[in-house]
Amino acid sequence: MPDIEGLVNDFVAKLSKRKVEGSQATSRLTAELLRSVVSLQRLPPTNPSAVLIEAVRGIGVKLIAANPVELAVGNIVRRILHIIREEDLSLFISKTSELDLAASDDEGTMYQDYDPTQSAVAAAAKSFLRSPSLHALLENMPDKAVPSNIYTSSSGGDSEEKSKADKLSMTRKLKHDVIEAINILIEDIDTCHELIAEQAVEHIHQNEVILTLGSSRTAFEFLCAAKEKKRSFRVVVAEGAPRYQGHALAKELVARGLQTTVVTDSAIFAMISRVNMVIVGVHAVMANGGVIAPVGMNMVALAAQKHAVPFVVVAGIHKLCPSYPHNPELLTLVLIMWHLSLSAFSSLTLEGITRHICIVSFRTTIQLMILICKGGYISEDIFWKAHSYSKEF
């Protein structure tokens, strides 16, 4: 549709010219765009989920290509693809339950009113929803094409008009449920900083010394939330060369009344023994529990591991990435993000120059506590959070 094309082209232009900055803003705009795509997309009565998935996937490829460095775009696209599959499966389950009830409604007259087609469809649906065990694979399955016939009528005797009405009703319900789920995702993105900050009092205690590196809004809100809860603590901010964003973070913390000390990156190992906890923000949390972060973060993590200092990563749910740090495409694309200005980065990206290594990925041997919107997880458990939508592309 021309409306969809116009929205997509406009957002692709903004991503290409780097007019949208920050993972939260980018992920929110991506979710809003895909919500509009779902709303405007015309769906056929038969198998609308496949059409919707194909439309979202095609647009997602364009968005990722427009700004491949911003991993939040791909994360949101994968999440929405997963939402479509979940809502489609939910409709399939409800349809199956209706077939099941209709097939076993009147046991007294089952031999008089027996419908073999309906029973076969219900049995096939049960087999489809069953966990993929060896017994289920070896068991005879009546009809394996039931998932594609979910939007057909539940009885062979229904009129053609009723069958068409049922298909249209389920198509509208699928679109409505997907839009509602995307609205919930957008709300989670908007409130991610507040949800993470609510956990601050559980991790920051009285008279502690907190070390952080660079500048992160999530870490800033986390520290300020602990201050508002009457926690008295000191913050040591490493300046974070070569961009020295630690100075900007230190000014913001001082303005909020926190005791703040700025140190050079070379002094981190000397300071780490006096620190009670390290709290940092990152660019992305990978599927294996590793993180992609600015240069210098790996040094902080190694120093914290050496002195047994807790290392806490705060990141919104939109930064949870199902990829792995050793992915060659990922390593090629994220090399120069934090080293250059946006204009210089855009020009170098167009020329294909990716030589300035300014992002590191942690080794999974370093134990991390990762705080996201829905609680804290150790690095090994992050795999299960990203596994559900890791194969959407």
Image (tube, rainbow, N blue to C red):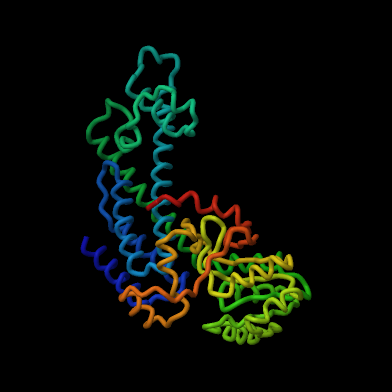
Residue at 38% in and 65% down: 30
Q: Position of residue 368 (x, y in %)?
A: 63, 61
Q: Quadrant of the N terminus?
A: bottom left
Q: Residue furthest front?
A: 355
- The one of 131 and 212 positioned closer to us in this rendering: 212
- The one of 157 and 150 positioned closer to us in this rendering: 150
Residue at 40% in and 31% down: 125
* In the image: residue 343, left or right of residue 279: left
* In the image: residue 275, left or right of residue 214: right
Q: Residue furthest top?
A: 111
The vertical placement of 227 against 166, above or below, is below
Asked whether residue 287 appears in the rendered view, the answer is yes
Give residue 89's quadrant in the image. Answer: top left
Give residue 312's quadrant in the image. Answer: bottom right
Residue at 38% in and 67% down: 68
Give residue 9's quadrant in the image. Answer: bottom left
Asked whether residue 14 appears in the rendered view, the answer is no
Q: Position of residue 261 (x, y in %)?
A: 69, 85
The vertical placement of 338 against 72, above or below, is below
Q: Position of residue 3 (x, y in %)?
A: 24, 64
Q: Position of residue 79 (x, y in %)?
A: 43, 55
Residue at 30% in and 73% down: 13
Looking at the rendered structure, the number of numbered marks drawn on it comes to 0
